[in-house]
Structures are given as structure tokens and as C-alpha cells.
Amino acid sequence: MCGEVQANLPAYVDRSLPRIRRRLVGLHLRRCSECGEEFARQRDVSTGLGRLSQPPAEPPEGLLEQLLEDAARPGVKGRVAVPARGAVSGARPALSVALLVAGAAAGTGLGYAGWRGARAARSRLRR
């Protein structure tokens, strides 16, 4: 009985359970402390999720000033640490291209090997 009641708890919490079933679940919850505790947990989670979906009443203090200050700063390249500037600005395009090609080749090879393995496994199952 507890398994069936606990399976119906999400619908009981959001009040989408049919009326007769809702009454039966409610009766069981009054008698079973374990199911009652699970109901309380699910109700708390549902309440918390409901609060998260509501937008805050007002933006935090100083948000507009912070956004304007951030907009006045230089772009990403201007804020990146010095050692990373070469990679961000494309100072070594040959290395970047080589790494991209190697990654694409490795991905293609792994995909092909997986496809061949799955195909071989299917043919063994058919025999």
C-alpha cells in the first residue's frame, strides 16, 4: 500500500489526483508516519521550486551602476590575463588548426569504430 501511495504523492502535492484517490491517499497519510514524512518532503520541494520560479520584487541595490561600469571596461581581450592573450587573439593559428584537425580526426575515428562495433554485435545476435 505504501508504494502505491508514494507513487501518487506528486499528484497529491500538486492537487491533480482524482478526488476519490486523493481521499484514499489522505487517509493513508494520517495513519502512516513514513508516508507522511515523504509527503512533507515532497511538499517542501514543491514549495521551494514554486518560490524559485517567481522573479525577485526588485533588482539588488547597485546593480545598474555595476552593469554600466562593466560595460565601460574593455572587451574580453582587454581583460584576459597576459599569458592567455596569444590564444584568445589567434597569435598561433597553425597550432589551433592542427589541434582542431586532430580532434576532428579522433572524433571521426571513434565514431566509426563505435559504429563498426555495434554493427558487428547486431550481426552476431542475428546468427
Image (cartoon, rainbow, N blue to C red):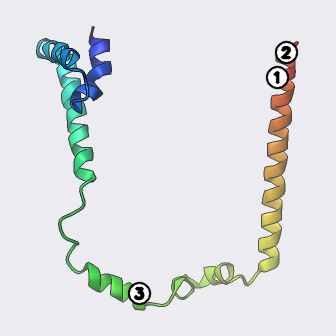
Please, what secondary structure does the residue beneath circle 2 have? helix
Please, what secondary structure does the residue beneath circle 3 have? helix
Tell me the amino acid under the disc marked 1: Arg
Residue nearest the observer in this picture, 89 or 11: 11
Quick one: label 3, few (<14), some, or many (20+) residues within 10 Å? few
Q: Position of residue 30 (x, y in %)?
A: 11, 16
Q: Which mark is residue 71?
A: 3
Residue nearest the observer in this picture, 98 or 47: 47
Q: Are marks 3 and 1 in contact (CB under 8 Å)?
A: no
Label 2: which residue? 126
Which quadrant holds the N terminus?
Answer: top left
In the rendered image, the vertical position of residue 119 relative to residue 6, given as above or below? below
Sequence-earlier tag: 3 or 1: 3
Residue nearest the observer in this picture, 17 or 36: 17
> Measuring 80% from the left and 44% from the top, which residue is drawn there?
111
In the rendered image, the vertical position of residue 27 relative to residue 51, given as above or below? above
Which quadrant holds the C terminus?
Answer: top right
Q: Are marks 1 and 2 in contact (CB under 8 Å)?
A: yes
Q: Are marks 3 and 2 in contact (CB under 8 Å)?
A: no
Asked if residue 39 lies left or right of residue 81, the reply is: left
Tell me the amino acid under the disc marked 3: Ala
Which residue sits furthest top? 1
Quick one: label 2, few (<14), some, or many (20+) residues within 10 Å? few
Q: CA distance from mark 1 to mark 2?
A: 6 Å
Q: Which mark is residue 122?
A: 1
Q: Position of residue 66 (x, y in %)?
A: 31, 83
> Measuring 82% from the left and 16% from the top, which residue is drawn there?
125
